[in-house]
Each structure stands twice: as C-alpha cells, then as structure tokens.
Amino acid sequence: MASGIKDKVAILGMGCAKFGERWDKDAGQLMVEAFDEALVDAGIDSSQIDAAWLGVAYDVVNIGSSGIPMSFALRLPNIGVTKVENYCASGTESLRGAVYAVASGAADIALAMGVEKLKDTGYGGLPIRTLGTNLDMIGIEGSGPGNFAQLASAYRSAHGVGKDDLKHAMAHVSVKSHANGLKNPKAHLRSAITVDQVLNAPMIAEPLGLFDCCGVSDGAACAIVTTPEIARALGKKDLVTVKALQISASNGWELQQAGGWNGSYFHTTRIAAARAYEEAGITNPRQQISMTEVHDCFSITELVTMEDLLLSKEGEAWKDVLDGVFDADGAVPCQIDGGLKCFGHPIGASGLRMIYENYLQLLGRAGDRQLRTPPSLALSHNLGGQPSENISAVAIVGLANA
C-alpha cells in the first residue's frame, strides 16, 4: 500500500527569474537566471544533479518537444531531462517528477524547472491552440474570461450571493494581491489599486473586470531537491521538506449533465486537496495551513478555491475574503508574493514560482513581505483548463519538524 512521500524529500535550493515582459531574454536565459540562484542557494555544482524535469506548456517559442533546450541552456552533465506539460500545472508536474525520483531512490539530487515565454507569441492573452477537432470538441479554445465568468454566476446561484457582494469580494481579492505584489521586486505588476478602481474598470466578461484578470508575462522558476539526509550532509540546517504532492485530472464527470456538478466549484481541486491532506497528515486545514499560494487566474478562481481547499466553509468564502481572513495579516494569508494577479501567468513557471514564495516564507527569507507569524506549513495550488474540465495540483511544503 502506498505510504506517500511526506518528509522523504527536502528542497535543497530554489530560484526564480523576474517575471514580466522580458523581451531582453529568451527562454534559455530565463532558465539560467532562475537556475543560477537555485545553485547558489543549494550550495552545489551542476555536475551533482542526477536528473531533471522541464515544465513548459507551449512549444511555439524557443522550446521544442524535448528537454534538450534546458540541457543546452544550463549545460547539464548529459543527464536525463524530461519535458512535461499538464496545462497550468506544468511547473508543479515537473516538481512531481523530480520529487518522485528522489523519494524512490532513483536520484540523489534532481532538478525541476518551469518556464514560459508568452509575450513572444504575439498574443494578448494565452495563445490559441489549433490541434484539430478533438480540442475544439472539448472546448479548451474558449475564452478564459468567459469560462470563468460562468463560474462566478454559478457560485452566486448556488449560494444565493448578491451580485454586489460578490463583486466587492472579488475586488478585495485583487486589491489584497496588488498590495502584496508591491513589495516584491520579481513581480511583473507592482502598483497598489483600490476597490473603486476594480469596480469601475472596463468589463471583460461580466462580472469580471480588467482587474479581476491576471496578465500575461514571461518567467522561470526552479527547485533542486534531495533527501533530508543528503541535505544535512551538505550543511543545511533549516530544512523545508515536501509533505504532499497530488494531481487530479477531470474524467468527464463535470460534463455529464446528470452528474450533479453545478459549475460553482472545482471538482478536481477538492480531490487533489483531500489526497494531499491525507498524505501530509492534515486534519484541520484552516488551523494547520499557515499560508497559501493559489491559482488566481481570475479573482473568482481564488475565492472559490478557498472552499475547495476547505479553508472556508461552503458558500462562505466571499465573507471570509471581505473579513480579511486571507490578507497578509489574516488567519490564512494568501498570495503573499502578489500571485498570478501581479506576476502574470507564464504557464510552465507559475507552479514553481508559488512554491518558491512558500519556501522563502518558511525560511524567513521573504524580506519586506515576510509574514509576522512564522509559517510552518504552506500550500500551493494550480488549476489548468476551465471549470468544466481541468487539472488541479496541490503541493504542501513545510519545515522538517512540522
């Protein structure tokens, strides 16, 4: 029977490039930027890495269909490099490969990298995939704002939430994240906004306005992982270990009209979260999780995710948001680095960027945005696809003794 990976893998080092419109760098150079920081943090040489995984969602700019571009860019020592893609969970998927390799004993030290150069595609939003009729049939090519606007409408209907109440809660989500991102030199968007600005911004897809939507950017982030024993032998004293890492993919249930799904939540997130909590030994998430980085592609997504992660009661996340539960000084701080709202969403990089912030906070190295109450367990969440068909990833990391 599977026993899980709790505390079998430690994060030896992490790195993150500056996110934004990085016209001056190609994908390889962004990977080098993140990798150089991670190597220094880990205190090792690249020759000590046994295996690597690369998460990237779009092949159209600088990255082909293999791991060779990363092996070239980082001058890796002819090791196995595996390219993975799992929609917006691609970065977390790359970490899963590296973590599983170490936990199984197949590698002593492994690398996980996520990167994306979306600005170079020429699209104002995510590039449109044109892979034939199958993709058209499942609807992934639809408008992101349109798909998630339906989530907001379904949430209101399911829980009897007033239109203005939900809009104010969504505005609070965006204002909170911008206040946090203002303190982060690696964020793409670093400016404070007000509730009035959010409520009076141009409408994109009712009820989602301009400030309810995350931007498009370039970026890269990476992690170097090993066993706790090797980490300590290399001189690491304060260890951040992986407590759980779970991924859940839709199987069509949401699209079956008789299935019972009402469109107001993410079925896969609830499954991935339940599995992750079991693996990590967490029985009361609201009390035990110190902080979160979640997939705030739209403000409504973050709000709904709080319920899917059991951090809010069913139908009450909007109240918790307005009460400041997820603010920097709240009970369960969320998006302390600014989230997708301020970093944008270079797809392959986002999952590892979230874990990077959790890692810094756990070690007390987040600078001006360091939480007042030292965190011990931190959760990250990715969501790829759309409400009716998606992939969810939940990763929990924490101090070794937590």
Image: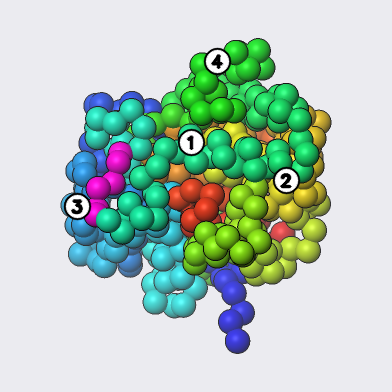
Query: Which numbered marker is on residue 238?
Result: none
Q: Read off the residue under disc 3.
A: 64
Is label 4 in contact with label 1 (beta carbons under 8 Å)? no
Picture quarter with the C terminus:
bottom right
Tell me where residue 136 appears, x and y as whole percent: 33, 52
| Dot 1: element | helix
In space, the residues marked 3 and 4 are separated at their CA atoms by 38 Å
Q: CA distance from mark 2 to mark 1?
A: 19 Å
Q: Earlier in the sequence, mark 2 or mark 4?
A: 2
The image's mark for residue 158 is 2
Quadrant of residue 316 within the rendered picture: top right
Marks 4/1: CA–CA distance = 17 Å
Looking at the rendering, the stretch of residues picked out in magenta corresponds to 127-132
Q: Secondary structure at mark 2?
A: helix
Label 4 near label 3: C-beta < 8 Å?
no
Q: Quadrant of the N terminus?
A: bottom right
Amino acid type of the residue that numbered disc 1 sits on in the rendered structure: Gly
Q: Is residue 159 magenta?
A: no
Image position of 27 (left or right of 220)? left
**Disc 3 and disc 2: Cα gap in Å?**
43 Å
Q: Amino acid at mark 2?
A: Ala
Q: Main secondary structure of the magenta part?
A: loop
Dot placed on the residue nearer the N-terminal end, 3 or 4: 3
Residue in the image at 66% along x and 39% along y = 303
Q: CA distance from mark 2 to mark 4?
A: 26 Å
For residue 202, say whether it is visible: yes
In primary-sequence order, the first of circles 2 and 1 is 1
| Tag in front: 4 or 1 | 1
